[in-house]
Image (cartoon, rainbow, N blue to C red):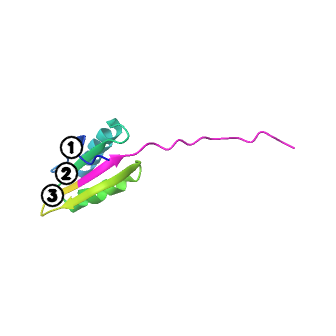
Amino acid sequence: MKTHPDAILDLRGSFIPVAMLEFSKAFNDMTAGGIMEILVGDQETENNLFKVLRAYPHELVNVQESDSLYRVRLRKGRKKVVVATTDNHQK
């Protein structure tokens, strides 16, 4: 299975709300199975990224941390389809 990124999103220097919006748009535009590498420059942005990721099907491929650079590599998952059913059978 491939691990090289299909897209790289550099969020270093972005304000957290803007960075999360940029991530959401870019990740939504990717196809399932695609890999995105996200670059952030501080721990707070990385923490917020992982909070936002709860809303998206994904697999964490790799995280690398150095002095002032965090690289987060994700594989986009497929959306879960929920089928609503009703039981119209009455006895």
Q: Earlier in the sequence, mark 3 or mark 1?
A: 1
> Are the residues flagged by discs 3 and 1 in contact, CB closer than 8 Å?
no
| Of residues 47 and 66, the one drawn nearer to the viewer in this rendering | 66
The residue under label 3 is: 69
Q: Position of residue 80 (x, y in %)?
A: 50, 44
Q: Residue at x 22, y 62 (%)?
A: 43
- The residue that disc 2 covers is 39
Relative depth, front residue between 64 and 51: 64
Which mark is first along the chain, 1 or 2? 1
Residue 27 drawn in magenta: no
Q: Residues within 10 Å of mark 1 (few under 14, many from 20)?
A: some
Compared across the picture, whether 25 is left or right of 69 comes to right
Which one is in front, 8 or 40? 8
Residue stretch rendered in magenta on the structure: 72-91
Pinpoint residue 40: horizontal percent, then vertical percent.
19, 53
Quadrant in the picture for the C terminus: top right
Q: Amino acid at mark 2?
A: Leu
> Which residue is pictured at 13% across the width and 60% down the height?
68
Tag 3 secondary structure: loop
Q: Are marks 2 and 1 in contact (CB under 8 Å)?
A: yes
Q: CA distance from mark 2 to mark 1?
A: 8 Å
- Identified at 38% across, 49% down, the residue is 58
What's the CA distance linking mark 3 and mark 1? 14 Å
Q: Are marks 3 and 2 in contact (CB under 8 Å)?
A: yes
Mark-to-mark CA distance, 3 and 2 = 7 Å
Q: Which residue is mark 1?
A: 8
Kindly give the residue lying farthest to the right in the view shown: 91
Q: Secondary structure at mark 2?
A: strand
Q: Is residue 6 left or right of residue 12?
A: right
Amino acid under label 1?
Ile
Q: Looking at the image, which residue is at 36% across and 42% down?
A: 33
- Which x, y percent locates residue 57? 41, 48
